[in-house]
Amino acid sequence: MTPILSIEELKAAALYDEREIAEFFILLNFGARSSKRIVYFPDTDTFDINNEIDNSWQEDLPASELANETLIVEAIEKNAFYEY
């Protein structure tokens, strides 16, 4: 498990490469995890995020909206966001 410490690190780790979707998680209270599969598309500066807890998708999410539409930025700021 690798901590993700910035949005730039997330972009690099989730970069679209046609092979597989990168897997991440937010570390919650008492050791629980909120698992996510994320792909980053640099040409549009957008993310596709699969929230595995309910299999919901957030597609074409601009990087500028990541803090408003997800808890990922908050988790990064709290050192609670990791790549599997």
Image (cartoon, rainbow, N blue to C red):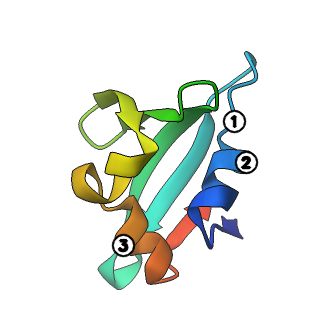
Quickly name the residue at label 2.
12
Using the image, tell me which numbered label, if any, was put on residue 74: 3
Mark 2–mark 3 Cα distance, whole angstroms, equals 18 Å
- Could you say which quadrant of the image residue 40 lies in? top right
> Residue at horizontal 36%, vertical 39%?
52
> Residue at horizontal 52%, vertical 81%?
79
Q: Quadrant of the C terminus?
A: bottom right
Using the image, tell me which numbered label, if any, was put on residue 78: none
> Residue at horizontal 43%, vertical 50%?
35
Q: Earlier in the sequence, mark 2 or mark 3?
A: 2
- For the residue carrying disc 3, how many other residues have a C-alpha within 10 Å: few (<14), some (14-19), or many (20+)? some
Q: Are marks 2 and 1 in contact (CB under 8 Å)?
A: yes
Amino acid at dot 2: Ala
Q: Is residue 47 visible?
A: yes
SS of the residue at dot 2? helix
Relative to 72, say whether 3 is above or below. Answer: below
Q: Nearer the viewer, residue 10 or 63?
A: 63
